[in-house]
Amino acid sequence: MPIARMSKVSILAPLDQREELVDRLQHLGAVHINDFATAAAQDDELKHFHHHFEPDTRPTRLSIAKTEFILELFERFDEAKGGLVSGLLKGQVHLTLEEYLQVEEEFDLETVYRELEEMDVEHRHAEAAISELEEDIETMLPWREMDCPLGEVAELGSTRLRAVIVNDGVLAEWEAEMDQRCPHAYWEEVGRERESVYVAVMVHVGDLAEFDLLASERGLDQVQLENGKTGTVEGEIASARERLSEQRERKKDLEEGIRENFSRKPQVLALNDFYHNQLAKEEAKRSLLHTERAVVLEGWLEESRQEDVLDSMKWLGKSVDVDFSPPGEEEKAPTLLVNRRRIRPAETLIELFGLPNRAETDPTPFVAPFFILFFGMCIGDVGYGLILAGAFWLALRKLDVSDNVRRFLRVFMYCGIASIVVGIFTRGYFGIDGYLAVDDKALPAFMRFPGTMDILKEPKPFMLICLALGLIHISIGVAIEMYDNIRHNSVWLGICEQGTTLLFWFGIAVAAFGYGIGLEPVGLVGVLVAGAGIAGVIFLSNITSKSIPGKFFGGLYNFYGLFASTIGDVASYLRLYALGLATIAIGMVVNIMASLVWGIPVLGIIALLAILLGGHIFNLAVSFLSAFVHPLRLQYVEFFSKFYEDGGEPFSPLAIETRKTVIDKE
């Protein structure tokens, strides 16, 4: 069965074996632990036995924070960092289980953290000093012609130095007002930069208030040059530049010191995963029911792993009791999909929508082939398909990524293969046939064998294929709902509610096939079957109604809804034709644009290659996005709406989970 059969497990153990119990369950990775402690606290009988237990997770969380600080610090100073692809190419850390379990003992996290934290603090101080010095130098540069020592100016008793920036357009007016309002002031121009005039002013202390008021009225910028400086401006600039050079050198040395620790990154990554797993164990302890002398665990596991749990618990001795029981009628077991290896990558598409509950059928075996086929129909080009299949195959071979990422890559590799197959039958080769097929000789004869279609000139066959696939797709959805109805309710209910719909659709398909190929008797049989389906929908689809008028009028309404929804649902699959046509059409336009520049001397071939490369990359990127989104929509909206309710809780056993560490089998 694609959905694993679950068994409920209860484990009773002495309190002093709690740590070893949780540790063994984590290494086994088979038991999804329920929050039995919360349930017991709310139960009138069990709450008298339950002793609240709150594990101290602060040390573990602190260790996680330290490892994440180190990793973030390494990332900041990693000169080789780049985008998503380069991030994937960095790969993961491979360790044996023994090496992984010993990483905490072999790595002195506290010492490394303290050293790197000190370097980081010093580096930030150096950056702040550099920024301050650069700003100070930039401020002083326009005033470098001032040759008076700033320290001596600051010591004058009756005057104060004011450095102001005056706009050249108001300089004359400002000077006239200064003569009137600050008669004891002396000023001198020390520099110019575009419209700004830099003026040094010696102001008598009695005129300071009036000077500041005039500067405010004129909107002048005042610059504080002294700020503890004693030498000339030129000398202070030279001194600041020397200190700036020292700070930059210090910053560079600190960065090199941090990079020298990069060799420790694999251990820090492993340690980060290790502490996250330690935290998961501590959180799991909170879910156990605690009494004065014992702990009780409740959870779920696959039926096939009961013996594994028993074997693991034997090592704890006879004082541990393990009990298995099937799920109760009201109990909601978590969902675990267990499809075959070739289908398993498509489980990712199901998880994006939501897992099925245990009363439903796992749709993965049906989603996988249809999604891949629909994707191929949206691309419909041999060249693009080869690029996709080759790129994702190479990624699977070369990239060291997590299992979830590998599943996505494998799905898209299959999609690339489907694009090749569909492209062969639609003559899709980078839009060449669509552009050059005026004389029907653009492609060799073996590429235009009987059965291939030109969806630009003769779209009807491909459109009919899309409609037929749509009808088959939604029919499978209704058939799954009928199967679930028969399993959980009754055979009669499944036949009346879903069987009549399938009969109606089957009759339509047979009639279309018969009249389409010119076999009128087959078409007539199809019409009769469809009529029987219509009668079944009207008289049987509302069989649960208690009154005869309710059955009839309810069935009539059901048929109206079925007829309208059938047209809408099946027509939605024409988007496959539209997207496949768009891919070919854009490729054709790219080829036409490239041909227009072919005759340009010298630059023609360069322009041609640029247009072909850029245009087809753009077409592939846009088509890839559309081919992912729209087939997924057909699954979620058209297919799932016929039977799928989701709502399944993911099966999340207590296990050694890693993000950047791969624990290799020894």
Image (cartoon, rainbow, N blue to C red):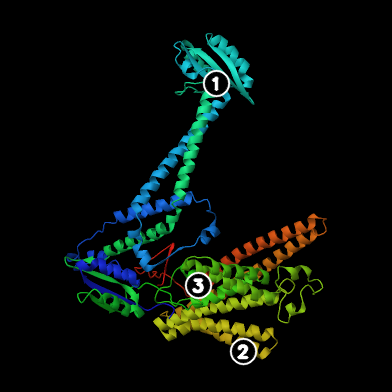
Q: Nearer the viewer, residue 138 or 194?
A: 138
Kindly identify which residue carries mark 2. 525
Of the image marks 3 and 2, the number of the one nearer the N terminus: 3
Of the image marks 1 and 3, the number of the one nearer the N terminus: 1
Of the image marks 2 and 1, the number of the one nearer the N terminus: 1
- Whether residue 568 is visible to the viewer of this picture, yes or no, is no
The amino acid marked with disc number 3 is Pro
Kindly identify which residue carries mark 3. 345
Residue ID at (56%, 82%): 504
Name the front one of labels 2 and 1. Answer: 1
Q: Position of residue 398 (x, y in %)?
A: 54, 67
Mark 1 to mark 3 CA distance (whole Å): 70 Å
The amino acid marked with disc number 1 is Val
**Which label belongs to residue 164?**
1
- Whether residue 471 is visible to the viewer of this picture, yes or no, is yes
Q: Nearer the viewer, residue 586 or 294?
A: 294
Residue ID at (54%, 79%): 475
